[in-house]
Amino acid sequence: MNAPARIARIFTMMAFLSALPPLALAGNALTFGVLPYVSPGQLIKQHGPLKHYLAKTLRQPVVLVTAPGFGAFAERTRRGDYDIVFTAPHLGRLANTRDGYQVLARTGHQVRGMFIARRDSAIRRLEDLRGKRLMMAAPRSMLFLMGKETLRQHGLALGREVVWGKTRTHNNALNAPLRGKADAALTGIVMWRQLDPRQKKQLRLIGSTPPQPGFIMLAHPRLPKALATRIRQALLDFQHTAEGKNDFTTRALKGFAPIAADDLVPLDPYVNAMRETAS
């Protein structure tokens, strides 16, 4: 099978896994739900090593699945379709308080939104976005909610002073100014740091949001506590293994670190804002 055919097969399979109820796919395997914060191909590349590591460490099959969007992922989390989830901090807080998920670990990095514009434009600061088109993805995402609040603090209401350009993923937003689809964009700090230097030279950083905790790993309450403890330890050990020594772990998300449920209490305002956005 040639390379284009293999790539097409991967995307077809990921779309198939995204569309079906996860528990129907897993059988006796652990269902590992990953928030669709980037494209399906990128999810496979970034989280495949962790999936294989967990399967080897736990001596149990692990199935990697996602969902068509943030809303669908949150709903499937609520339904209990996932045994373990890798999700945004505010969605992790919601899953813990509403659905009883056990908090396992957090990524070592912090979530931070980066506002960018083309370097050859007149946009040099957030206030210059007045009347401009800003590309932002996933209204229920932590990044979106942080970006919206940061704009408000600068006297800019999204949808009023700033035109909201909608897109599905944060990496789509990142590329929008380069493609002429928007005047500016909001993306995450990890994607900004990993951007090709040739593309980064064409862009200007015009502002950022305050930092918040990174992604959260949780286990469904149906998992035995002994198994959840093993998963937690495996996550904390991951960065020290051969599988974990890659850009995703060591330079981007910085491995996994301990976290307690009480550490997520400051995220409650973002949970409430997400609920208001969804209503």
Image (cartoon, helix red, strand yellow):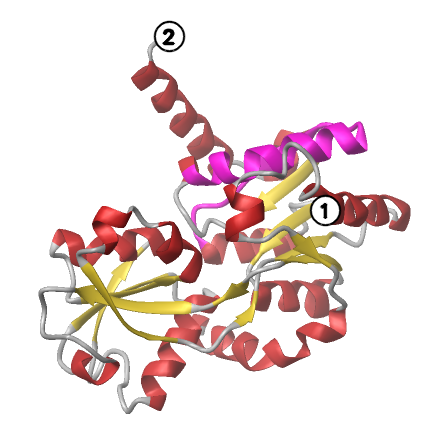
Find residue 154 and report its horizontal and vertical position in percent: 30, 89
Q: Residue at x 69, y 68 (%)?
A: 98
Neighbour tally class for label 2: few under 14, some 14-19, many 20 plus, Cα within 10 Å = few
User: Which percent across, then down, holds residue 125?
Assistant: 22, 80
Residue 258, by quadrant, is bottom right
Q: Which of the two marks, 2 or 1, is nearer to us in this view?
A: 1
Q: Is residue 77 visible?
A: yes
Residue at 58% of width from left, 51% of height from top?
76
**Residue 60, horizontal then vertical, whole percent:** 77, 29
Q: Secondary structure at mark 1?
A: helix
Residue bearing the label numbered 2 = 1
As drawn, the label of residue 167 is none
Q: Disc 2 residue type?
A: Met
Q: Which residues are magenta?
A: 42-69
Q: Quadrant of residue 90?
A: bottom right
* Residue 246 position (above or below residue 123): above
Q: Residue at x 49, y 45 (%)?
A: 67
